[in-house]
Image (cartoon, grey):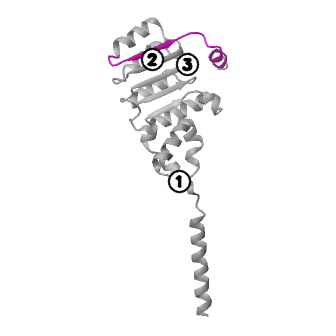
Amino acid sequence: MTRKGKGKGKRKGKKRNQAIEKRPRWLELPEVIWVDILQRLGAVGMMLTAEKVCTTWRRLCKDPSMWRVINMNNCCDTYLVSYFKAQEMCRRAVDRSQGELVDINMEYFATDELLAYVAERSGKLKRLGIACCYDMVHKDLVEAVQKFPLLEELSLTHTTITTKGIEAIRRSCPRLKSFDVNNNSCFMCLVWYSDY
């Protein structure tokens, strides 16, 4: 009887070794490569898909350093995320940055309230991009931008910013190196905006 018991133990050991050998080789990639891959997905891709793949990716997706740059351009089109879901996801991404956010792009869904939320939690912000957001009041935009003392780049595309607002931002942001304003009519933006 003792021989049978020993034989079974060896079989179990072989199965464990085979299971270890069957582990995909891609799981052995250095963490630096995983970080690069995940950051290429962008904020929405990381939240909707990547963090659900495996525990390693989930752990990496929760690291605040992964959220220093938040790019949410075309998220409403690419991922079929609603206007309100995009705002919610942006808030979650800002929270995950834990104050380390330095660069954010918001397209189609930015509001005065959302920008105020970002301003309250992102004192290190150096770059801000807002596009196709027509329901923002220029006064609130100016107030929010003034809360970014390190802001170096500002891009406003298809927004309702006025000449007075542009001047106020220019005066209140001494570190600003690049300030792009493009308010030419955007058919795609106008069609999308008219749905709300």
What kind of residue is marked 3? Cys
Image height check: is 150 above or below 181?
A: below
Badge 3: residue crowd in 10 Å (few <14, some 14–19, many ≥20): many
Spot occupied by residue 162 in the image (x, y as percentages of width and height): 47, 8
Residue 24, quarter of picture: bottom right
Q: Which residue is mark 1?
A: 55
Residue 8, quarter of picture: bottom right
- At x 63% / y 34%, what residue is drawn? 79
Q: Which residue is mark 2?
A: 141
- In front: 29, or 156? 29
| Segment colored magenta | 173-193
- In front: 128, or 22? 22
Residue 178, quarter of picture: top left
Q: How many marks?
A: 3
The quadrant of the picture occupied by the N terminus is bottom right
Q: Which residue is mark 3?
A: 133
Left or right: residue 152 versus residue 134 is: left
Alpha carbon separation for disc pair 1 and 2: 39 Å
- At x 53% / y 42%, what residue is drawn? 37
Query: Regarding mark 1 in the picture, which secondary structure is present there?
Result: helix
- Inspect this view and state whether residue 34 appears: yes
Q: Check residue 184 for magenta coloring.
A: yes
Image height check: is 157 above or below 1?
A: above
